[in-house]
Amino acid sequence: MRALGRFLAKETVEIRRTWRLPTVGGVLLFFAVMSPLAALATPAIIASVSQSQPGVVIMVPDPTYLDSYLQWIKNLSQIGLLLVVFASAGLIAGERSSGTALLVVVKPVSRRSFAVAKFLAQAGLVAGATAVGTLVTWLGTLLAFGEAPAAALVAASGAWLVGALLAVAVTLALSAVLPTLAAGIVALVGFGLLGIAGLWPPLLQYTPVGILSAPSALLAREPVALAVPLATTALVIIVCVWAAGALFARREL
């Protein structure tokens, strides 16, 4: 536990001093600020486009708070997930390639603790950025539309966060055996395939695929059974973090 604490303190300092905090936190904050603005501006943009096309009339309903929430979740599900994957791809691979991992593991501490600390620190960064972004989205939506029910937004953002933590764990395991770029690409391809796999209903009901598709469904107030997908996602996260430590322990530095 003492070794884990030391590694975690190291990772926390590293997050503050490197590009990960301003990039992950900054991009999610940008999404949060822009989501209400984009929801407000969309009808005007569509109207401007229709006016430039004689004879074309496009009827657009007035935007609501839900449009702002959907914009936030859409940005998270697309660019946000990509950002999380590539911010996690070098967690172990980057330290192996730079040689800093060797300086750490020559001490009498466990490589598994090193991997666990990597996951916990990165998970804390993603969770913190998501929480701040969700709060800013809620405040911006309230100011823009005069109403902003919080429950749906919190539920959708929470579901996305669970999927993002899964992405961190999977990418961490890949980072233990692959170079940074390869780990990121393989992880993205894998999550892309999971998105396609969601077309088969049993996977939505019993696997982490259900978590990845849950945010939009929660905003649409569709019935979503999350107990089993949450349990299987937690299990996969634990297995991936354990595998990252085990694989890293077998790697020559």
Image (tube, rainbow, N blue to C red):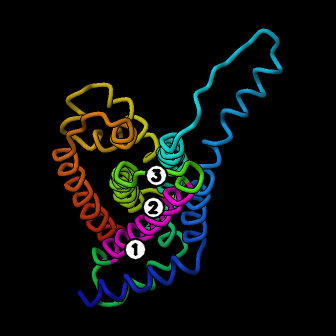
User: In what quadrant of the picture does the N terminus appear?
Assistant: bottom left
Residue 133 forms part of the magenta stretch: yes
Give the main secondary structure of the magenta stretch: helix
User: In what quadrant of the picture does the C terminus appear?
Assistant: bottom left
Residue for badge 2: 130
Q: Magenta stretch?
A: 114-140
Residue 90 drawn above or below residue 98:
above
Sooner in the amino-acid sequence: mark 3 or mark 1: 1
Point 80% across, 21% down: residue: 51
Number of other residues with Cα within 10 Å of mark 1, as a class: few under 14, some 14 to 19, many 20 or more? many
Foreground pick, 72 / 84: 72
Sooner in the amino-acid sequence: mark 2 or mark 3: 2
For residue 200, what is the image quadrant? top left
Task: Give the CA distance from mark 3 to mark 1.
Answer: 31 Å
Task: Give the CA distance from mark 1 to mark 2.
Answer: 14 Å
Position in image of residue 217 (x %, y %) = 35, 37
Point 34% across, 72% down: residue: 120
Total marks shown come to 3
Residue type pointed to by label 1: Ala
Compared across the picture, whether 60 is left or right of 157 comes to right
Residue 104 forms part of the magenta stretch: no
Residue type pointed to by label 3: Ala
Residue type pointed to by label 2: Thr
Res 121 label: 1
Task: Give the CA distance from mark 2 to mark 3.
Answer: 17 Å
Residue for badge 3: 148
Point 24% across, 35% down: residue: 223
